[in-house]
Image (cartoon, rainbow, N blue to C red):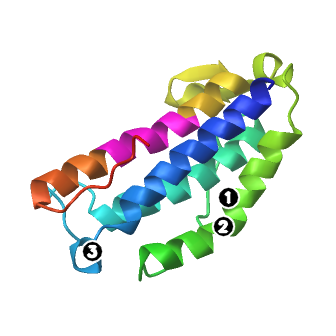
Amino acid sequence: MNGIDLVILNLEEVRRRSIKVWSVIPLTMLDWRPDAHALSMKEMIRHVLDGEHYYHLALLNCGSLPSYDSPYDNREFSSVEDELIFAQVYREQFLNTVKFFTPEDLSNIKINRSDVGYVRTLGDMLMRIAYHESVHTGQLLDYMRTAGIDRPQIWD
């Protein structure tokens, strides 16, 4: 297994576990948030899916985008299943882009996001993308605990 294969495996495992969490949130609880300043559960799921699309475009651009028109703007969130169906095309495009890279690209390509404080290698950026989703999945598990929602076993 090479570095690209490992990155893909990590991205797929992170998403599989996210879906396990997202899928058990009752529809009636998707608007729940721990306080007025926090994202709701559905906003956090949307943020992860939209963030991955943004990051994909940033990878293609080798840096931050000068502007971003989200395909999620003005789209109503109706269910987790519907969000995943909508996001599938963007997910496949992202994974296909990652599969196109070579192991050498992981350290040779630089992603310039100096506007937000960093320039990193492609490999580092891909790991950050997975970490971003993982952090939000952990936040949702905490939301679920606080709201009294049964949490799935993600450590299988």
The residue carrying mark 2 is 88
Rendered-image quadrant of the C terminus: top left
Front-most of 5 and 108? Answer: 5
The quadrant holding residue 103 is top right
Main secondary structure found in the magenta portion? helix
Q: CA distance from mark 1 to mark 3?
A: 24 Å
The residue carrying mark 3 is 26
Q: Position of residue 77 (x, y in %)?
A: 42, 78
Q: Position of residue 32 (x, y in %)?
A: 19, 67
Q: Residues within 10 Å of mark 1 (few under 14, many from 20)?
A: some
- For the residue labelled by badge 3, is the local secondary structure a helix, a strand or a loop? loop
Q: Is residue 73 visible?
A: no
Q: Is residue 60 above or below residue 80?
A: above
Front-most of 27 and 47? Answer: 27
Residue 15 sits inside the magenta stretch: no
Residue 131 sits inside the magenta stretch: yes
- For the residue labelled by badge 2, is the local secondary structure a helix, a strand or a loop? helix
Q: Amino acid at mark 2?
A: Gln
Q: CA distance from mark 3 to mark 2?
A: 22 Å
The residue carrying mark 1 is 91
Assess whether mark 2 and mark 1 are in contact (beta carbons under 8 angstroms): yes
Q: Is residue 13 above or below residue 20?
A: above
- For the residue labelled by badge 1, is the local secondary structure a helix, a strand or a loop? helix
Q: Amino acid at mark 3?
A: Pro
Q: Position of residue 90 (x, y in %)?
A: 69, 62
Q: Amino acid at mark 1?
A: Arg
Residue at 54% in and 51% down: 15
Magenta stretch: give its range.
Answer: 129-138
Q: Residues within 10 Å of mark 3 (few under 14, many from 20)?
A: few
